[in-house]
Image: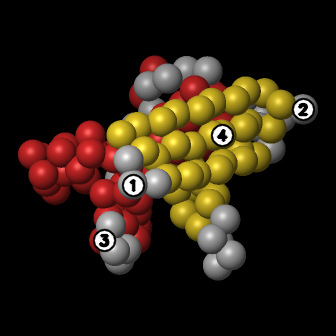
Amino acid sequence: MIFGTGIDIIEIDRIKNSIQKYSDRFKKKIFTQKEIDYCHSQADPAKHFAARFTVKEAVLKCFGTGMTGGILWKDIEVDKLNSGQPFLNLHGNGKKLFNQLNLKHIHVSITHDKTYAAAHAIAEK
């Protein structure tokens, strides 16, 4: 049974500009060290940071809460299987809310091109 769904899209340049303006402060507020390391291992890190940002936004939307309830950006971590399929590691209040809502799984899909990154999340009960 589907509990909720969320979608988000962002211009990659918006994230690129935030990284240039706030550098490590921005990255460390939004992304886990594992996400930062992954993005920096890619040819175009900004594209991957933007994609992960959209996943976090989409997941908050499928929870139906936004940033309320004390969920931090880093409570939602994007990882990937060897196949490239993205999956979530939830921490802190993100994991707590997932459990309170009795969710089974959150499916995520990510896409990006030169200009935009987008993500879709579906919470399964």
Separation (CA) of disc 4 from disc 1: 22 Å
Front one among 65 and 102: 65
State the mark number for residue 121.
4
The amino acid type found where label 1 is placed reads Lys
Q: Which residue is mark 2?
A: 1
Where residue 112 sits in the image (x, y, percent)? 49, 53
Q: Which residue is mark 3?
A: 40
Residue placed farthest to the front in the image? 114
Q: In this picture, is 6 found above or below 81? A: above
Q: Earlier in the sequence, mark 4 or mark 3?
A: 3
Q: Earlier in the sequence, mark 2 or mark 3?
A: 2
Separation (CA) of disc 2 from disc 3: 37 Å
Residue at 73 percent across and 27 percent down: it is 4
Q: Quadrant of the N terminus?
A: top right
The amino acid type found where label 4 is placed reads Ala
Mark in front: 3 vs 1: 1
